[in-house]
Amino acid sequence: MTSARLEAFSDGVFAVAITLLALDLAVAGPGHGSLAHQLADHWPSFVAYVVSFFVVGITWVNHHALVDTFVKVDRKLLFLNLVLLLFVVAIPFATSTMATYLRGGGDDAHLATALYGVVLEGMGVSFAAIFVWSLRRGRRAVPLPEDAVRTAVLRFGVGSIAYLVAIGVAFLSAPVSLAIIAGLAVYYMFEQTPAT
Amino acid sequence: MTSARLEAFSDGVFAVAITLLALDLAVAGPGHGSLAHQLADHWPSFVAYVVSFFVVGITWVNHHALVDTFVKVDRKLLFLNLVLLLFVVAIPFATSTMATYLRGGGDDAHLATALYGVVLEGMGVSFAAIFVWSLRRGRRAVPLPEDAVRTAVLRFGVGSIAYLVAIGVAFLSAPVSLAIIAGLAVYYMFEQTPAT
Amino acid sequence: MTSARLEAFSDGVFAVAITLLALDLAVAGPGHGSLAHQLADHWPSFVAYVVSFFVVGITWVNHHALVDTFVKVDRKLLFLNLVLLLFVVAIPFATSTMATYLRGGGDDAHLATALYGVVLEGMGVSFAAIFVWSLRRGRRAVPLPEDAVRTAVLRFGVGSIAYLVAIGVAFLSAPVSLAIIAGLAVYYMFEQTPAT
Amino acid sequence: MTSARLEAFSDGVFAVAITLLALDLAVAGPGHGSLAHQLADHWPSFVAYVVSFFVVGITWVNHHALVDTFVKVDRKLLFLNLVLLLFVVAIPFATSTMATYLRGGGDDAHLATALYGVVLEGMGVSFAAIFVWSLRRGRRAVPLPEDAVRTAVLRFGVGSIAYLVAIGVAFLSAPVSLAIIAGLAVYYMFEQTPAT
């Protein structure tokens, strides 16, 4: 198996997962109050949709940049990649649950936002695990220089800790937690996993 | 990252989004009046399905024709492309909301059709932004001649203004607004973004 | 645009459409009678799933075999291909409607099965239109010999008429109509559109 | 048709099927008890999601490894592959039915788990049929050595029998049956169909 095949399958899963996010945008329809009211009431779904869309989109970009450098695909990598995709595919569920409870308000909004953070943390950690896998000799076309490794480890550390913070903060304030996650997406947009 | 990868991912998203459009065709089933009556009552869903199907399909064709000419893919392009896909993925939601309220009648049909126009306007503007990105030296295999740029700018202008008109008209007459959007789809089928 | 891109996008749409077929298999869950009873009651969904799965799968195989021979892709082909996909994407809806009404029984089962036939007829006719498009000089890598054209025309004729018969028969007996459609799928599995 | 096309289409179907698995994770939302309670109550869905995700993921890996060796694609292979995909696509349905009834408890949990086993058995048997197809001279790039064939037959035998055992055990204990299926997924992760 080449890394091209691994990417093609992963691309398919990313594409479907990112598109399923939009299923949660649906409003209840006539007989549930005016549409304007329903749309206004629905704001957490729209915010959550945009945040998750960019989280998945940027993860896809970084996943591609990373996997593209691999010259070898073994069983361990396939397994790690499946674990990553397991979390990616769970994002529409976590997004929709969070949005539903942010709408409904109440204490469960805290737990729902924390759950969202847990799925993202799982995704981040499996992504980091793939990166660690790639550091062994003979797995990348060109070995990564020492300082690039240090930078990458720092970056994964920032992400893992920020998601943990977001999970903790979720129990105090769901919107602040979501803002941390959105900020992290912006961070990862500019800070790419070093590919070469 | 090459433009081929960008296209492959975008193709996946377009393909899933276009297929999800059909989920809204579903009728309520036995016990909700005769099937013939339900299907007749359902006409806005069928019209909206056909219009959105061609809007997404033609956008895909033009997206491909445009992206294919790029020799460089940078972070800015990836971001602009994600914004475009964000709107593409929202089309099944906007289509289904419009169809539901066109069926239910009432004042909300105006707002629902305007919302549909807003999503299409967002898609059109992000598409234009990708085009503008491509005009910088070194981003296309062959620089676009001046007059082709003028033609394209004109064409994007027509689209952006037509969608804005459709949004405004939606508050007067939803069917007329939808007719403008359908007409624009036919226009874009024949008027392609210049690729070379 | 090359035929490879056209195929890649079409493949995506076929793959999603064929997978969405399974969404209709869902049973109502606990509290709606024993599971054994529900599954038995659900037989039209299982039959319809298998028939539609092979109809879509075989259409994909034949679509690929046909499109692969094209050296030119123009706007007209893109449009015809979108029309074909419009019907392919509607198959899960038509399948699910037919299965629902076959289960519920009553007169509407006739109309629902006829509707299913109409979608398949639409698919067959658009497929034939793509074939006709390909006969013009310079569109295939190798022009099709006269007798291969005759065979193909005969074959498309058989399909178009058989689907029309199935639509008519649907109003007399839905199961017989479905059997004709299933038989046609078997026929197309062995009788391929000539590619060279 | 080349094996590359067959793989591309199959990849698409695998990717969509694996992503649809997550649709069953959805909780009922506010007004159905606390979220914590709902998530706890939902455990069979999470377990079933993880098991099915790896079953589909590993089948994809092994499918790719097998098909990649084929130099010839004929109608029989296409048909066998469609049968395999028919079962793959049915996995989200079988998973969701099993999870629902494991949650609801009662006798139907046995039947639902057995149904899940039947779908996996069907997938395993069609996979084995593709392998048997590949043994004929001229179908693989390099003929498989005798002992590799013996190993593979043994492996498929283990799988087929284990799934049958899981189906039988389902009527005694649904969780034990699910554990056998999960164990088999782990087994297939390490024991790959010989490709060369």
Image (cartoon, coloured by chain):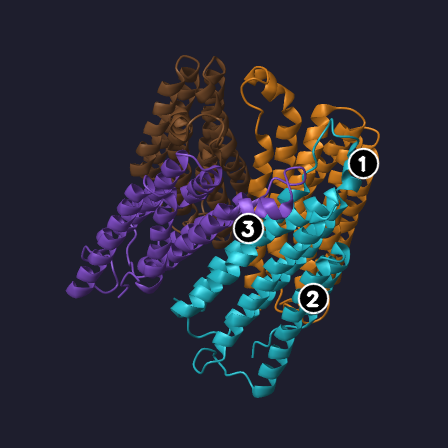
Chain colours: A cyan, B orange, C brown, D purple
Q: Which mark is residue A16?
A: 3
Looking at the image, residue C94 sits to the left or right of residue C34; the answer is right
| For the residues bearing labels 1 and 2, Cβ distance under 8 angstroms | no
On screen, residue B4 versus residue B166, left or right, reads: left
Q: Are marks 2 and 3 in contact (CB under 8 Å)?
A: no
Sequence order check, earlier mark of 2 and 3:
3
Residue type indicated by callout 1: His
**Element assignment for label 3:** helix
Instruction: Choose mark 2 or mark 3, whichever is in front.
Output: 2
| Residue furthest out toward the bottom | A146
Name the residue at 76% across, 46% down. Answer: A43
Q: Chain of mark 2?
A: A
Are the residues flagged by discs 1 and 3 in contact, CB closer than 8 Å?
no
| Tag of residue A165 | 2
Q: Residue B52's spot in the image, x, y percent?
A: 64, 38
Same-chain check, marks 1 and 2: yes
Q: How far apart are the alpha carbons under marks 1 and 2?
A: 34 Å
Q: Is residue D167 visible?
A: yes
Label 1 chain ID: A
